[in-house]
Image: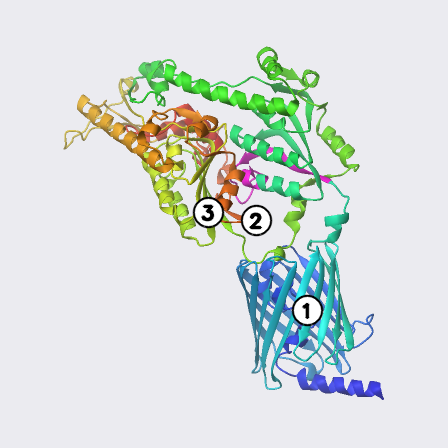
Amino acid sequence: MKKILVSFLIVFYTQLFSQTAITPYYERNDFLFASSGALKFGLYGYDNPALLTYLHQPDMLFIWSDQRANWKELKRWGLFAAIPKIGFGTIHEQLPIGHYADYRLSISTGDRDLGLGIGYGWTRTKVLQLEKSDILILGTLYRPARFLSAGITLTEALNTRGYEIAGDIAIRPLGNEKIALFADYAVHRTSQLNKDMWSAGIVTEFLPGVRITGRYFNTDAFSVGLQFSLGRIELQTQAHYNPSHKYDYNVYGIRFGAYDRNVISKYFSRRKDFVKLIDGGRIDYQKFALFDNTRTLSNLIKNIEIAKEDPYVAGIVINTSNMEVNQEIAWELRKKLLDFKASGKKIFIFIDQCDINTYHFASVADKIVMDPLGTILLQGYVMGRTYFKGTLEKIGIGFDEWRFFKYKSAAETISRDKMSDADREQRQKVLDDWYKIAREEICSARRFTFEKFDSLVNNAVIFFANQAKETGLIDSIGRWDKVKELVKSETGKKESIVSEKRLEKHNLPYDDSWGEQPKIAVIYALGACAMDEGIKARKLVKDVEAAVDNSKVKAIILRVDSPGGDAMASDYIAEALKKAKGKKPVIVSQGFVAASGGYWLSMYGDTIVSSPITITGSIGVIGGWYYDNGLKSKLGVSTDFVKVGEHADLGFGFTFPLINATLPDRNLTQEERAVMEKDIKLLYKEFVEKVAHGRKKTADEIEQIAEGRIWTGLDAQKNGLVDLLGGLDLAIEVAKQSAGIPKHQEVSLIELPKKGLIDFSKFMPKLIGLKTTFNTDPTIELLKFHLKHNGKPMPMLPMEDLDVIMKKAGMFN
């Protein structure tokens, strides 16, 4: 009799409510353990489509209820699956009068601050009483801070009249996943049901992946749930109690797919892997979005830090074979690896063809493995120049050097046939500093005395594998398989070298932190200072201004790798940064070269961070004038002109074929040259005064370290041109501190300008062995650059230094 009565009540309830246009909120969401926005991703868009903005990997949840049958009988079940931004869900139920299935398809857009979603739902059944209207669901999720989440959904019937509005709010007192308090409220308005409903509860996760939920409904019913994550698999159960507080039914679930926090990896896992951080190839600041295997400095720094904190990681392996990286970036990575090593984890590095810079980098390793046929070249450091004065005289090109400052040697290769004493002095000091840094760091890592290192450099120079091992430069001889053997002996497993994509941090869900992480803009000023080439100041200034105006950006880092060039281009960016000061912190991170116009870019930073090997300073201005001195005659070229104005023909001349650059017919008159001298000295005075203002010093103090002299970061810190020695990671730390961001708070880097989608030059064919104009020879580009700025007073380094930077920093990318 009791079973008949229960069946009758079920049929009555179904006929009363299931024909409604919209299934009520709390019946539709009885598989939820908490309000939609309070716990992970809800039902993957089935409840609130906007929640899909937080999904990080494909995931699937199968859940069922024993409300109408034994738990083994699947009479009410749901399947919810999603990939980031797209979700699908279905709920099936077998009632005494028949079966129905509800389906939902959802999509979302937005970010972790504000998500918007839309969904479409429909029902399939053969029973007339179970038919429902198709529905449209609009959802929003607002998380302005890590403490607060608020969501609203509007469900509208499409085949009949009726709607439902449901809102939920959740608060995390600790700002993380440990505890959340939540409440929701639903307003249901259809012809069959006109009612308001609400619930409130709590979610706790004091152990990773172990979540306990409690939820109270306005009907006096309540539920208690448990979720236990095993990583990519999760088990769930939830007990429901009726308004009389008696046990009613249970819900069971299993989730699989996306990786989740879990207590096993945190406290019990013994699995240890080595991460393969670098496998040769190019390392640079930026990369194209597609078909570009370049590793970026910011990404490598981030992965080293993540690997240090990852409980699964025992060490890092690096293959330097065919690795392309400049000296300064290598120093930054070495410093970061040294910090990793200090955590007690291991570093194994493989080398084959190795110069002093590569060996300096590799010396950080616990074990260095060298190819049996490899070599180490500890040649020291050299700076040499090629002088073209005689060549230009022979071919008929004249050059007039406008040099008025002792160390500003940019034009020496054109105006002289050997190095000036001043240039020799400053270059020797740079090399002495580089050698000192490399010697100290290599000797510390390999436990050499300075005397032994000096002897290796001065008396041996080249080392083959056996010699390298005998002298203690390396630990083992072998190919990459030898590194694998070392890893196996360390971990006890055969296959334990993994990609950085396997790092736990890259796989954890985003729900541990609501809202967007604080943003720091990293703006790259790379290459020659020019308006439309190199740093592309005309466009770059817009990126600076956008970062200043973006309220989500809490600090700005200008990463400078530039030897200077056009003062106007440098000043465009410097003035934009000056305007930003006081609005948000401006930190300058100097790369391999940040000198002359590159220092002009830097001078207004609140804090300037430089590596000890950075070439910086060179506060000075130089100019010069290329002109025809017989070349036209030798080529059989002639020119002629008419003019209005005494100096109108200044700069007129014949145009070189192919490179589209003009060589003027004549040199300047004494009167014209006097004007240029005055302009150069005025620009230098302005440069010094600007630096003095930026560095909070007097012009006289700056004058003592100016006159075009280059300094390493090591000396620049001593003379006050830079504040701190370090790399991009230190600049980020300083930016966080200056912006009031807690030290352990993660930040999101916005890197500008964008590199682009594809490097089309890779796909351009070579015709008869010649490169197309998409991949022009750097020497030609340099010549064009100089002729384009012929006669301009310029804060820049020598031509060959510009060539080095162009190759290493991508001047004409």
Q: In the rendered view, would you say 5 is above or below 565?
A: below
Q: In the rendered view, would you say 270 is above or below 14?
A: above
The kind of residue on which mark 1 rests is: Leu
**Label 2 to label 1: alpha-carbon separation:** 30 Å
Residue underneath mark 3: 555
The kind of residue on which mark 2 rests is: Glu
Which mark sits nearer the N-terminus, 2 or 1? 1
Q: Foreground residue, 168 or 373? A: 168
Residue underneath mark 2: 746
**Label 3 to label 1: alpha-carbon separation:** 40 Å
Q: Is residue 620 visible?
A: no
Which region is colored magenta? 273-300
- Using a 10 Å C-alpha cutoff, classify the residue at mark 2 as few (fewer than 14 neighbours), some (14 to 19) or many (20 or more): few
Q: What element carries label 3?
A: strand
Residue drawn 46% across and 51% down?
553
Q: Foreground residue, 105 or 518? A: 518
Residue underneath mark 1: 32
- Quadrant containing the C terminus in the rendered view: top left
